[in-house]
Image: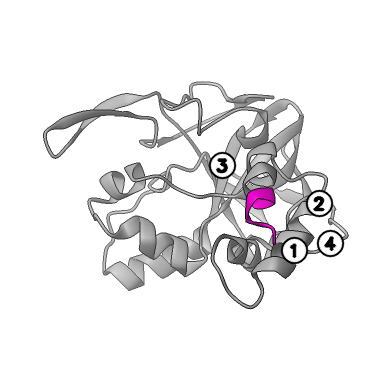
Amino acid sequence: MQLLSISVGMPRTVDDHGKPVSTGIYKAPVAGLVAVSATGLAGDGQADLENHGGLDKAVYAYTAENYDYWREALGRSDMPHGQFGENLTVSGMPDEAVHLGDVFRIGEILVQVTQPRVPCFKLGLRMGMADFVSRFMTSGRVGFYLRVLETGQVRGGDPIELVRADAEGLNIRDCMLALAEGPRQQEIIRRALSVDALSDAWRASLLKRQA
């Protein structure tokens, strides 16, 4: 596993069918060492602080294997790292191999997986596709948010080490099944709620869905 690149960006205003919308989804790769605090990366920001950022969602990671999938599925090559709004573009960390509560060392920082990413409509704006959010969700290739346990600096090329695997072993792709009615929904909700590292926002949402 490796950190391929780091992307940051500050909120900007974009046009949504004639309506101005503020968004922080536009990220661009940066070179060199980047400081990571408990609330995120230096030079990065979010427009909607109610739904983005915070200690439980300080860093968003997306794996390069998902880029390969989307380039083929969409027939597009215009997708540089940071295209999906991620801070860390990684390799060797597909959604089915990363679990809620897993702890990783990346460069100097220690991070813990807290929840899958559930995008808002602004991802569709970024991709220029009105239906992309639904396609993204159903693909199961959503990436994951990280809580920063130890701050420090990272740079592209840093190795990623699994420090501690969560005992429940609920992977990110399966975790998304908690959001839709189906034969495994209640099982997944129960398992997710048993993970201490689960973000407060997801815990509150799943408690409402629990039968």
**Residue 165 forms part of the magenta stretch:** no
Q: Quadrant of residue 152?
A: top right
Query: According to the image, label 4 marks what residue?
Result: 168
Which three-letter amino acid code belongs to the residue tagged 4? Glu
Report the colour scheme.
one colour
Q: Residue furthest left?
A: 18
Query: According to the image, label 2 marks what residue?
Result: 195
Residue 94 appears in the figure: no
- Secondary structure at badge 3 equals strand
Which three-letter amino acid code belongs to the residue tagged 3? Tyr
Residue 183 in percent (x, y) is at 63, 78
Decide which of tag 4 and tag 3 comes sooner along the chain: 3
Pointer 4 and pointer 1: residues touching (CB < 8 Å)?
Answer: yes
Q: Nearer the viewer, residue 3 or 18?
A: 18
Residue in the image at 61% along x and 32% along y = 58
Residue 152 appears in the figure: yes
Give residue 60's mark.
3
Name the quarter where the N terminus is drawn: bottom right
Disc 4 crowd, CA 10 A, few/some/many (<14, 14-19, 20+): some
Residue in the image at 36% along x and 49% along y = 80
Residue 104 in percent (x, y) is at 76, 47
Residue in the image at 47% along x and 24% along y = 45
Decide which of tag 4 and tag 2 comes sooner along the chain: 4
Q: For the residues carrying marks 3 and 2, which lies nearer the camera in this image?
A: 2
Above/below status of 209 relative to 22: below
Label 1 to label 3: alpha-carbon separation: 18 Å
Which three-letter amino acid code belongs to the residue tagged 1? Leu
Pointer 4 and pointer 2: residues touching (CB < 8 Å)?
Answer: yes
Which three-letter amino acid code belongs to the residue tagged 2? Val
